[in-house]
Amino acid sequence: MKKSMLIIVSTFGAGGTAKSLLSFIDVLKDEYNIDLWISTFKGPLYNYLPREINVFTSERLTTYEQYYQKGYAKILSKLNLYVSAGAIRLRIKIAIKKALRREFAHDVQKMQIRMANLEKLPDKKYDVAISWMDHFIYILANCVKAKRKIAWHHMNYYEMKKDPNIDLPYFKKVDAICAVSKDCRQVLVDTFPILQNKIHLVENLIPVEVIRKMATEYEVLPEREENCFYITTVSRLNFKQKAIDRAILASKKLVERGLNFKWFLIGYGEDEIKIRNMVERYGLKDYFLIEGVKSNPYPYIKLADVFILPSNYEGKPIVISEAQVLAKPVIVCDYLSAHEQVKHNVDGLVVEKTPSAIADAIMLLANRMDLRKDFSDNSWNKPWHNQLNVKKQIIKLLNG
């Protein structure tokens, strides 16, 4: 008889956490009856869920997301109020911004706990319950009945600016904490040394054959121009984490250097209007092309000569593995876990977090077809078969 499982997730958008969850569900659906609890049905990947999965939602979590957006707007107004241009020295401005962001992160943290305590989940005891998004550990810890509780962490805990003293009691209530990269695990261990025996490294499952098949599926793509260098970025559209503004500034430098290129940006996010305005302001509409969200971005990745992720920080972005599965050279900024996925000068380039560094790397690869081929071959030949070991590790953790 199948065991029962509850998975708690925020939303089923088009990002890496949703893709990794699809892979997770796919390998476990034959062994577990899975209930999936999400905040909203919106999101292009929702339609890829297996039919046998029982999905339900909570209106309160939609309220939470609205509350979060309002709260962020309030913090931005504080920044504008206290940090007016020319009022104080730059280093003081930065210190105030950091303090306010930390204060905001702690306020959101407390609000998430209050919202979690209001949730009414089914009066049912599961064999296993999982929080797939970092902040849903509060619901997992307090509102769910299960023989075994496991919290997944997809982000760098340090970069989330949370208060560990607030989180510790909730972390103690779960049986295991899974981090998706070595560096993310180490940050958790350093932050919560008393819990190190329950903090595990569990890498994302990568559906290699599915990705390669979807990359060949029909998608209306621009006709490839001769002597044009093609770049793709698949990312949430924001500045703070994903640093799309850095990509735009790198594009400006490429134009100044005379490179003929097309840079496709796939995704959606809170800074889309700012991004479009920035592209317009720098006269990059013919070079930096915002394509919006795509349920299947893989044809765009396949089209590219290089894949770029300009982020400030990441957990272990599944989109980098997806690009490598499609044998694409990658350029990433030097965030914490970058070297876990990209071997510098072997299958890609890890560069400084500056527009100039990104532009330099692009120019190098645009002028060195031999280097691109080496990176491509090394990416294609990565040991993707290790996914079987990841599956075995997950099953072992679920069983305790």
Image (spheres, helix red, strand yellow):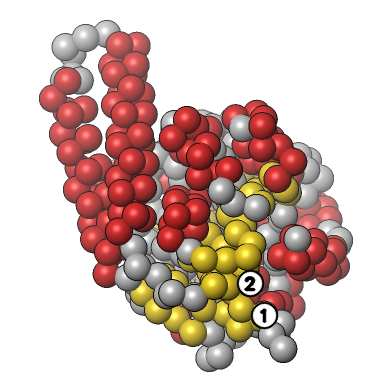
Q: Residue furthest top?
A: 89
Q: Earlier in the sequence, mark 1 or mark 2?
A: 1
Q: What's under tag 2, amino acid-wise?
A: Asp
Q: Residue at x 77, y 49 (%)?
A: 347
Left or right: 362 in relation to 288: right
- Whether pointer 1 and pointer 2 mark residues with C-beta atoms closer than 8 Å, the reply is yes
Q: Residue at x 23, y 57 (%)?
A: 66
**Which mark is drawn over residue 3?**
1
Mark 2 — residue? 127
- How many labels were placed on the picture? 2
Residue nearer the viewer, 136 or 342: 136
- Tell me the SS state at disc 1: strand
Q: Residue at x 36, y 47 (%)?
A: 113
Residue 328 x, y percent position in the rendering: 69, 60
Residue 279 x, y percent position in the rendering: 32, 49
Residue 274 x, y percent position in the rendering: 27, 48
In the picture, the quarter occupied by the N terminus is bottom right
Residue nearer the viewer, 27 or 252: 27
Dot 1 alpha-carbon crowd within 10 angstroms: few under 14, some 14 to 19, many 20 or more:
few
The quarter of the picture where residue 65 lies is bottom left
- Tell me the SS state at disc 2: strand
Q: What's under tag 1, amino acid-wise?
A: Lys
Q: Is residue 27 visible?
A: yes
Dot 2 alpha-carbon crowd within 10 angstroms: few under 14, some 14 to 19, many 20 or more:
some
